[in-house]
Image: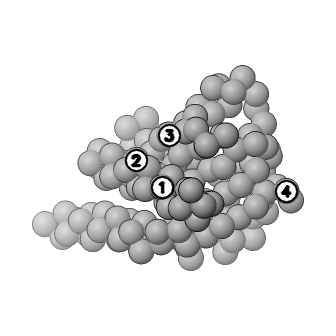
Amino acid sequence: MTQEEKDIFYMQKALAEAKYAFEKDEIPVGAIIVSNDKIIARSHNLTQMLNDVTAHAEMQAITSAANHLGNKYLNECTLYVTLEPCQMCAGAMYWAQLNRLVYGASDNHRGYKVLGTKLHPKTKIKSGVLSKECKLIVDAFFIKKRKEKAL
């Protein structure tokens, strides 16, 4: 399997996590962390359920991966996430020394790039993997929310 095929495969797994979040009325963002071609962590947003603004999919996945590895550094891991990370999550990735970040849809309002947040200098970044599918689920969630609010 090529790296591009792996990226699509793992992003599909992250999208499945985003769908779980959607079903739980959470902003539908899903994350997967992979080490040596094995999923070691998976999560989705839990901010509503946990009443915790820090319970983003990436933060949950980073904690889970660190626990799995018994190490706070993820310098041999790839994080797949359906939406461009915010500055909080990018900061956590910086401190975890994440090896590689792969994300689907860009976040032109709250994403780490527009806010000028830096990732670790050694972190490799790939964006736009299944971006249409990733954007679609976020858009559908907010359309649903606006309709509910209008009622």
- Considering depth in this image, is 124 or 47 the residue closer to the camera? 124
Residue 92 visible, this angle:
no
Earlier sequence position, callout 1 versus callout 4? 1
Outermost residue on the right side: it is 121
Marks 3 and 1, how far apart at CA: 14 Å
Marks 4 and 3, how far apart at CA: 23 Å
Q: Secondary structure at mark 1?
A: helix
The residue under label 3 is: 42
Where does the image place residue 149, in percent across and percent down from the top left? Answer: 22, 65
Q: Residue at x 53, y 68 (%)?
A: 129
Horizontal relation, residue 25 to residue 130: left or right: left
Marks 1 and 2, how far apart at CA: 13 Å
The residue under label 1 is: 9
Q: Nearer the viewer, mark 1 or mark 2?
A: 1
- How many marks do you count on the picture? 4
Q: Is 133 above or below relative to 52? A: below
Amino acid carrying label 3: it is Arg
Marks 3 and 2, how far apart at CA: 7 Å
Q: Secondary structure at mark 4?
A: loop
Q: Residues within 10 Å of mark 1 (few under 14, many from 20)?
A: some
The residue under label 2 is: 17
Where does the image place residue 85, in percent across and percent down from the top left? Answer: 60, 59
Amino acid carrying label 4: it is Lys
Cβ–Cβ under 8 Å for marks 3 and 2: yes
Earlier sequence position, callout 1 versus callout 2? 1
Q: Which quadrant, please, contains the C terminus?
A: bottom left
